[in-house]
Amino acid sequence: MKIILMAVGKTATDYISKGIEGFVKRINHYLPMEMVIVPDIKSSKALTEDAQKQREGQTIISMLQPGDVVVLLDERGKEFTSREFAAYVDKKMVQGIKRLIFVIGGPYGFSSEMYQRANEKISLSRMTFTHEMVRLFFVEQIYRAMTILRGEPYHHD
């Protein structure tokens, strides 16, 4: 199984970028993972929030393949402990999924088409974080999940 994290817009903060790169590199020791940056749609006075979500959603959907399992990182999604998330990832690997796609939306969230296309929604927290921080937190949790599944000493209960 390959994990793909799609995120709208590039990561501009250098230390966050470096942290993400470090965790993605570590994750690739366990299974293939990549970050896919969805081009940022520059908002303008002529573009409503809904129109921006629509365009971002169309771009993301165009990048998906028919068998992809799509999971939105959404504040209304299911919350997990780190061990529960590890079990979730393990279950997906056992199911024989080729591409597990996690998506971080743009500043206004997801379009209705994205919600319709998604297989699931998960939440990192009920708190609000910057989109850049969510990227870093999420790749760290994927790495943590892999070490939990391998019984390695990274995670402490």
Image (tube, helix red, strand yellow):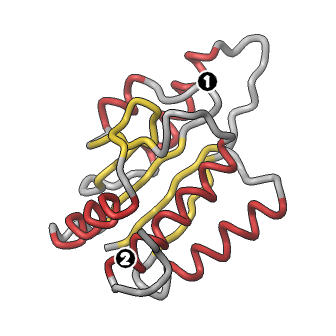
Work out whether 86 lies above or below 75. Answer: below
User: The residue tagged with tag 2: helix, strand or loop?
Assistant: helix
Disc 2 to disc 1, how far (Cα)? 38 Å
Mark 2 crowdedness (10 Å alpha carbons): few <14, some 14-19, many ≥20: some
Quick one: label 2 or label 1, which is nearer the N terminus? 1
> In the rendering, at what x and y percent does residue 98 appear?
28, 69
User: Where is residue 50, by image quadrant?
Assistant: top right
Q: Name which residue lies at 48% across and 46% down.
A: 124
Pick the quarter of the image with the C terminus: bottom left
* Three-letter residue code for mark 1: Gln
User: Where is residue 127, by image quadrant?
Assistant: top right
Q: Is residue 73 left or right of residue 90?
A: right
Q: Name which residue lies at 55% across and 25% down.
A: 53
Mark 1 crowdedness (10 Å alpha carbons): few <14, some 14-19, many ≥20: many
Q: Is residue 113 left or right of residue 56?
A: left
Question: Residue beneath label 2, please?
Answer: 148
Question: Residue beneath label 1, please?
Answer: 52
Which disc is residue 76 wearing?
A: none
Nearer the camera: disc 2 or disc 1: 2
> In the rendering, at what x and y percent does residue 77 appear?
37, 36
> In the rendering, at what x and y percent does residue 120 appear?
29, 42
